[in-house]
Amino acid sequence: MTSAAPASAPFTTTDSFPLLGTDYVELYVGNSRQAAHFYQSCMGFQPLAYAGLSTGLKDRESYVVVQDKIRLVLTSPLTNGTEIGRLHDLHGDTVRCVALWVEDAAVAYETALSRGAESVSPPTVSEDEHGTCIRAQIQTFGNTIHEFVERKNYNGAFLPGFEAWNPEYRPEEIGLKFIDHMVSNVALGEMNKWVNWYADVMDFKQLISFDDKDISTKYTALMSKVMSNGNGRVKFPINEPAPGLKKSQIEEYLDFHKGPGIQHIAVATDDVIGTVRALRARGMEFLRVPDSYYDTLLERVGDIDEDISPLRELGILVDRDDEGYLLQIFTKPVQPRPTVFFEIIQRKGATSFGKGNFKALFEAIEREQELRGTL
């Protein structure tokens, strides 16, 4: 098995910080084997690679799962006293690394450091019988890091140090295609700091911003700015809480995550109805908006290709911008702490992020917070 490229389009950009796309996302989890089973069974990911005791590691175990261009690395410690264990104890299941695919990892690393980034790991060459890979890491918000991955001379299953993982158990895929965006939560007053960091260090541009007038309910509010790299393949909305009568979803996240981090991963599909049906059948739980949301849906968004009946049945939201419309739905948290969750999104021309759904969505989140006793 060869390593699948995270993006298929030719790379043609004049960015001062060129990125080919998202290479993989690594999550620190309590039990990597059981987490891999969840992502296979519930979300249709396929087994790709493994590293652990049988590959010579003594401190951790990692399973890599893949679906189209999405690669998740699920890592747990094998013994006490590890950095992985310390971070998992602090944050619970959490996104540790957003790895970015680049042509030249050393150039990306040196450019980032010259613009103010903090080093985690300098460029490191690893190799096996399948070739050579170069990786380097920098620090970003909280305990989240970015890794620059150069794999043009590597043809193995995933990375050197991993072996192909070929179990018999292979549930069917459910149509997930690629990572559309990843949303981060930071503390009050920190949003602009990290917006500027992505602009200054990685030459990201701000696509759009939302303030507490756009994203608010009777009780809570937040502010958000969306940052994107030059070719639009990597997008990071960055949220911070805004003052409200009760504890916002961002404050709840920060309390349980014990600091900033990735709040949710938005994954794209070409058939949101089919994908959500499959997810529900496999046990995924979703946030629900009131049924009355659908009574005036077409008045708000205009004509759409889909019949409203399955959208109402499944709880899928719709929003329109000047470029088209999108369909989206949000899972409940996928671990015990009310932190990381997923968004399933289908874009039909729209380039926005569902502003028209914010109020209904956040009221749905508040209902869940009330049930948890954390509103």
Image (cartoon, rainbow, N blue to C red):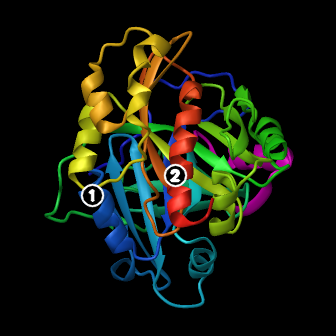
Note whether residue 268 is visible.
no
Reply yes or no: does residue 296 show up in magenta.
no
Number of numbered tags placed on the structure image: 2
> Which residue type carries mark 1?
Gln
Horizontal and vertical percent position of residue 68:
33, 40
Above or below 121: residue 9: above
Look at 58% across and 34% down and name the residue there: 358
Look at 41% across and 50% down and name the residue there: 71
Horizontally, is 133 left or right of 305 in the view? right
Horizontal and vertical percent position of residue 65:
34, 56
Q: Which mark is residue 106?
A: none
**Residue assigned mark 1:** 40
Q: Nearer the viewer, mark 2 or mark 1?
A: 2
Reply yes or no: does residue 114 show up in magenta.
yes
Horizontally, is 330 left or right of 82 in the view? left
Depth check: 187 or 351 in front? 187
Instruction: Give the crowd class for mark 1: few <14, some 14-19, many >=20 residues within 10 Å.
Output: many
Horizontally, is 140 left or right of 363 in the view? right
Q: Secondary structure at mark 2?
A: helix
Horizontally, is 13 left or right of 119 in the view? left
Range shown magenta: 102-123
Q: Which mark is residue 367?
A: 2
Horizontal and vertical percent position of residue 48:
30, 57
**First of labels 2, 1 by sequence position:** 1
Horizontal and vertical percent position of residue 110:
77, 48
Instruction: Give the crowd class for mark 2: few <14, some 14-19, many >=20 residues within 10 Å.
Output: some
